[in-house]
Image (spheres, coloured by chain):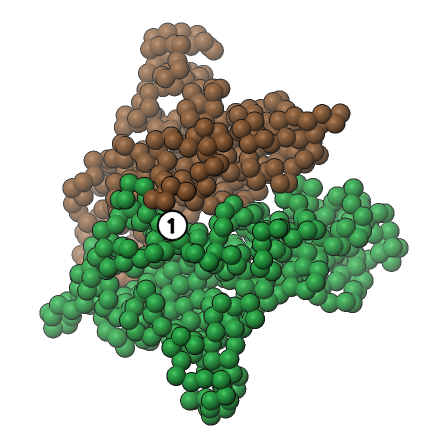
Chain colours: A green, B brown
Amino acid sequence: MRFTKLFTRTTKENPADEVSINAQLLERGGFVYKNSAGIYTYMPLGFRVLEKIRGIIREEMNSVGGQEMSMPALIDKKYYEAAGRADIKVGFKTGDDNFILGWSHEEIITAMAGRYVSSYQDLPFSVYQFQTKFRNEARAKSGLLRGREFLMKDMYSFHTNESDMLDYYEKVRHAYQRIFERCGLKAYYTLAAGGDFTASNTHEFQVLTPVGEDTIFLCPKCSYAVNKEIADVKMGDPCPKCGDEIVEEKSIEVGNIFPLGTKYSEALNLHFTDENGEKKFIIMGCYGIGLGRVMGTIVEIFHDASGITWPESVAPFKAHLIALPGGEAEAEKLYETLHGTRFALHDVLYDDRKDKSAGEKFADADLIGISLRLVVSKKTLEKGSVEVKKRGEKEAQLVDLTSISDMI
Amino acid sequence: MRFTKLFTRTTKENPADEVSINAQLLERGGFVYKNSAGIYTYMPLGFRVLEKIRGIIREEMNSVGGQEMSMPALIDKKYYEAAGRADIKVGFKTGDDNFILGWSHEEIITAMAGRYVSSYQDLPFSVYQFQTKFRNEARAKSGLLRGREFLMKDMYSFHTNESDMLDYYEKVRHAYQRIFERCGLKAYYTLAAGGDFTASNTHEFQVLTPVGEDTIFLCPKCSYAVNKEIADVKMGDPCPKCGDEIVEEKSIEVGNIFPLGTKYSEALNLHFTDENGEKKFIIMGCYGIGLGRVMGTIVEIFHDASGITWPESVAPFKAHLIALPGGEAEAEKLYETLHGTRFALHDVLYDDRKDKSAGEKFADADLIGISLRLVVSKKTLEKGSVEVKKRGEKEAQLVDLTSISDMI
């Protein structure tokens, strides 16, 4: 995409009303636009990052047999009433008091499952969606980390018995680990409380950072981790798993998984008939990831004084091509060549601006944070080359013009 | 995908509370699930159709330079107040009266554009999103044709002058024609009123069907069409374009485009500075397509007594493979072979059920309506073949087992 066609502009100044690093850098780079507290628009650059994260999550959810679908946001109050969650504070109600804006979809998916499931032969299965959630959070001031409206991947699984559910739970755990790894994040699998979702313990995926709102106790040696809210160890204690010393860390919860048991199947009357003709409640699990929060966390972890340093897997483009004086014609040609290869069609950002200095273009490239920077100038062309530099690295190298498109 | 893994089930009976053909067939086939009047879940099969429609629209919007982004649903009332649309009936308000659930996004995109646009050099551009819209419709009884919550593609374009906007408007018109053609629909470009959007005339894309809620006057010879609401011709009149006879038809509006002029740029103070340093209001256009309505319309047009007859481009899968007695092992092999080719991985529905008769499997295939049906049975294998039948055609043909994957 040509920079001159890009709708957004970068800014040098931090927005006055943002205190978090992720919101500051994402707004300055033109990735997001804050419409209200905790409510953001994903501008074209930010939308591309969101789509890359969505693609990674989708692949991994499909790999554990998840079936993608899409549930509504306007949820009749009766659904939430059935499980006693109609008056939970985070739920926005419509003015006519008929609907609650979906803040989680356990009730409605459980009710729908009743139409299709009757026998043990119909089980197990799991379904998921990417869908906008609404939560009226009081503390919506951490940029993308805590939104009042945000895109979430929520998956729900249905099983005949606890052990089958726990087997699947482990599979999803590993799929989640793969998702966070592919997004460049080291996430600790952390024991946690059930909150508004279930009475049993659950698991969170926590990424360490001083700006996190959560506190966990962690064993750096064996990765044992427990949320402070339910911990029976403290700083300096021996790790209950390996005996090494427990440390206390601030962290961001980027995902969570819940063994729901029969809480929702009992509330909404979801049965199956087993091999012996006996009627039983279905055992459920649920599994969430907030995509905006993942994006915000990546920025909190991957940035330096000049801007964002996206991991390649989620960067808005694969390469950032810059034309400098004397290099315009060749840059133009190179951009068109890269267009020719199918992947590159959508994956090169081309700074074709004529009214900006080299310094301004470099600053924007650093702020936007695409992993690979290509510069074409009179100087590089004298050597028949393009200057290639990785974001975050000091050293640049010259690569022959003719081999650059193979290299990418 | 294996039928035995599919979460949903088909039903023979029409749902008691659905009067429209599209809702009846889509619910019976397991494509959608009605949660409340005008509010549907897209189950895995329906979600696949929606995604195919989204893919077609996305390609065409990108082809006219649209930049994809994503705006929120919770819209501060002040935005709608600025253009005098805060009290329009279809707008759902939140219980705290702070937000209106987005039913159209002219105001908020106009407000955002103000951050990035200042000069004529920043224009023109266009942005679009696929986003859930909320409209509190009184008449939500036509299945997917009139929803209270529905996925919409809305695009907004920004220009320095009327003629540039109208040039772009024509480009989008042709992109829309391509979208509907690719979805199998013949849509008439119809002059219409501006409704709640603009004072000027606008254009609708109308598909003829007796179940349509709209009435248009149409010249079958030259395709001149005008919505009855603003028509100054009537049935039997000579066509103002070619003189042929005007007829009256019922139709469904599947898309609309609006020359907005300066209505929103004036309301929200969106200026640019022209070549002479003069400050002027930006000229805008907007362009909408409801994806669910397109899907519902396709079903209204493409069905027979046995079920849906999807156009290939939007069918949930490319092929529907059925294993019959004696053909199970070969069907299994064929399914795995098709898996091997990348496109087929997600694009074959495989009826591997052991407890269903041939008749039941054929009935489900007809109801679900995938364009290509493949049957493997003892009889077809005796000829080393697979029976291939197109949905909607009577004749089947035998295709050699070894060449079937090339054929698809």
Q: Is residue B365 above or below residue B152?
A: below
Disc 1 element: helix
Residue A312 seen: no
Which quarter of the rendering shows the N terminus of chain B? bottom left
Task: Residue at the far left: name it.
Answer: A277
Which residue sits at x=70%, y=63%? Answer: A305
Which residue sits at x=75%, y=51%? Answer: A361
- Residue B394, image x and y in percent? 27, 40
The residue singled out by tag 1 in the image is: B48
Which residue sits at x=40%, y=80%? Answer: A231
Q: Nearer the viewer, residue A342 or A351?
A: A351
Residue A207 seen: yes
* Three-letter amino acid code of the residue under disc 1: Arg
- Residue B257, image x and y in percent? 48, 28
Q: Nearer the viewer, residue B116 or B332?
A: B116
Task: Residue at the far bottom: name it.
Answer: A243
Horizontal side, residue B7 vs residue A31: left or right:
left
